[in-house]
Amino acid sequence: MEKIIIITGASRGIGKEIAKKLALKGLKVIANYNKSEKEMEELKLELEKKDIYIDIVKADVSKREEAKKLVQYALNKYKKIDILINNAGISEYKLFTDETDEDWNNVINTNLYSAFVMSQEVVPNMISNQNGCIINISSIWGLVGASLEVLYSVSKAGMNGLTKALAKELGPSNIRVNSIAPGIIQTDMIKDFNSKEIEDIKQDIPLEKIGKTEDITKCVEWLIEDNYTTGQIISINGGWVIT
Ligand code: NAP
């Protein structure tokens, strides 16, 4: 039977690549976006030229009501959700002493609260199906912390905690919950680094290169197929962080 998957933040970067690859593999993809409507429409059209149809749904997943509508859209149309990928995220570089309550709410709600609400909205359906796979796209900074990215690090560490606890609670319902913690991946998220900064980062990475979105997608594909991995934080980072 066709697998139904929701991917948040699928209009650009890692989420877009995951949506495209899984749609090409025959999964029924519900691709979420918030601001990048044009990019999302372009992916839909690109796939339609290959006779592959994805659903695109606008929702700011940092808000409960919008996350709920996204899940309801999927359930009304397909009656079940097999896989949820909590990928939507933002980064922020700031001195800790300059961070405001607004920054806290923005980063934590987008990166962490979204994963909490999206999971809460899909889990009842997964429990009644006694089947499910949740993949949270975290970060190495949730494992080891990053200077000037305190809020981002907090959000991703929280996501890792959510992953571990939820894996234990939902395991008996045959729902697997895992995180992928990328290092540095070539997307818009790193567009503000200049070429010197990128070269310096590469020198700190044992594999001496920046990751590609495909590197993350391969792990997503494996986690979807697997049936005995849960509660794990899988870090794909070229050896930059080895814990
Ligand atoms: P990106 O290219 O900037 O894309 C971010 C995506 O998140 C966009 O599709 C954006 O959609 C979506 N998004 C942001 N806020 C949203 C909201 N409130 N509601 C719905 N969608 C929202 O970033 P990326 O590099 O692909 O990052 C994807 C994930 O990987 C993030 O969680 C990020 O923290 C994580 N990650 C990335 C790296 C890296 O080096 N690139 C490293 C570690 C972890 P719209 O544009 O439509 O709003």
Image (cartoon, helix red, strand yellow):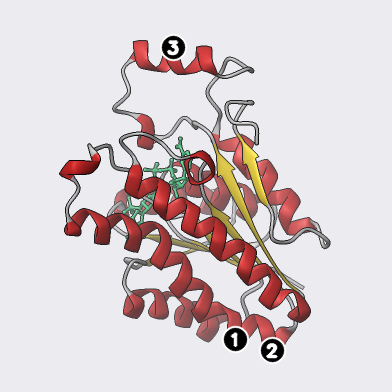
Cβ atoms under marks 1 and 2 closer than 8 Å: yes
Which residue is under mark 3?
A: 199
Q: Quadrant of the N terminus?
A: bottom right
> Image point 35% across, 10% down: which residue?
196
Which residue is under mark 1?
A: 124
Closer to the camera in the image, 34 or 190: 190
Tag 2: amino acid: Ser
Tag 3: amino acid: Glu
Q: Secondary structure at mark 3?
A: helix
Cβ atoms under marks 3 and 2 closer than 8 Å: no
Q: Quadrant of the C terminus?
A: top right
Closer to the camera in the image, 196 or 146: 146
> Image point 68% across, 42% down: which residue?
218
Closer to the camera in the image, 54 or 3: 3
> Please, is residue 231 above or below residue 49 in the view?
below
Marking on residue 128: 2
In this rendering, the label closer to the viewer, 3 or 2: 3
The quarter of the displayed image where residue 235 is located:
top right
Q: CA distance from mark 1 to mark 3?
A: 46 Å
